[in-house]
Image: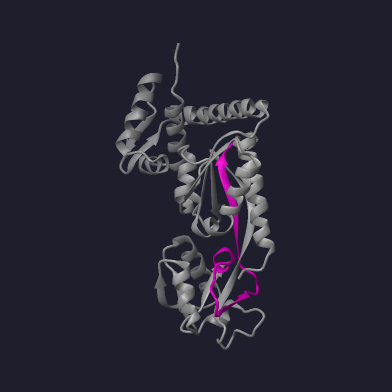
Amino acid sequence: MLVLNLWRLRLLQELADLGSMTAVAEAMQLSRPAVSQQLAQLEREVGVVLLERIPRGVQLTAAGLQLAAQARELLAHVEAIEADVAQAKGRVIGRVRIASFGTFATTVAPPAVLRLQVEYPELNLSFAELEPVDAIRGVVAHQVDVAVVDDLVPPQASSSSLEYVPLMEDQFYVVLADSHRLAARPSLKLSELAAERWAINESAAAYHGFLLNACWEAGFKPEIVCSCRSTMSAVSFVRTGWAVAVLPGLAAGTSIEGVVLRPLEPKLFRHISAAVTRGSTRRPSIAATLATLWSEANKFADGEPG
């Protein structure tokens, strides 16, 4: 009787989704040779050629594509069985590993984790601060249970094995020194900042690219005179009046005295959601975590940053 290894089937499914051994290795946090060895073992187990070499790597054969599609259905079914078993127990219990990017980690995550621990003392919680792409890879590799991400993440970072649960909209604000000539305005158009010097947090690549695209669409290229590795560094330079910044509300909410926040018109948003393994939302522990994250995120979204 043929007994297939679920882990190897998951690797095959991820190869079908992501398109390359390198991408699978990064997503599953393995070495490329380890992925290759596991898929070669899967080929030996099924006795069918699943991969064929092409000039730039490998591609799935017709049999490989068929098995990958069946693996996707099987893994979803396994997840559903595990969720049903957890649901039948009727208790919010077990391990939940949460990951999020920095500004969510400094604003929403701490009260959410505290509330979860108080309301569900049988939960075994852990938290890691990860950039969205890394957090998504963590969920794919089953090293993270709930990854808080934004929609600035490139589509190729995702996987069909994931589903996304909306948490909040995060509005962008202009950050100005309180002595700046535009500080008295109730709102600002992005184009009105075309002649300004800008401070940007270069370490957040997705945010950086999103903001540059928004400026280009508004008809200008920002003059970046201050390249920082953290939001607080950027805001500190803004405070001097030397530069301006545009930050999402989660980041702007941590700003310091001496600056003002003004909304953009038209409004500019990013959407924040939780990435989880498809089907896992039926688990009481995951459902409770998502509900609490949503509640705490919307407390923040309903308030005024700064």
Q: Residue at x 60, y 53 (%)?
A: 111
Viewer-proximal residue among 81 and 16:
81
Vertical relation: 137 (above or below) 111? above
Q: Residue at x 55, y 50 (%)?
A: 148
Q: Quadrant of the N terminus?
A: top left
Does the magenta segment cover residue 238? no
Viewer-proximal residue among 272 and 266:
272
Q: Residue 163 occupies which quadrant of the picture?
A: top right
- Extreme residue toward the bottom, this view: 181
Vertical relation: 135 (above or below) 180? above
- Extreme residue toward the top, this view: 1
Q: Quadrant of the C terminus?
A: bottom right
Q: In the rendering, at what x and y percent does residue 47 appear?
A: 38, 19
Q: Residue at x 46, y 84 (%)?
A: 242
Viewer-proximal residue among 135 and 296:
296
Is there any visible trace of residue 75 in the rendered image?
A: yes
Left or right, residue 52 beside residue 153: left
Vertical relation: 264 (above or below) 92? below
Magenta segment range?
249-278
Does the magenta segment cover residue 260? yes
* Coloration mode: one colour
Is there any visible trace of residue 47 in the rendered image?
A: no
Vertical relation: 57 (above or below) 247? above
Q: In the rendering, at what x and y percent does residue 89 appear?
A: 65, 26
Q: In the rendering, at what x and y percent does residue 7 appear?
A: 44, 28
Question: So how many labels did they put on this image?
Answer: 0
Q: Residue 54 occupies which quadrant of the picture?
A: top left
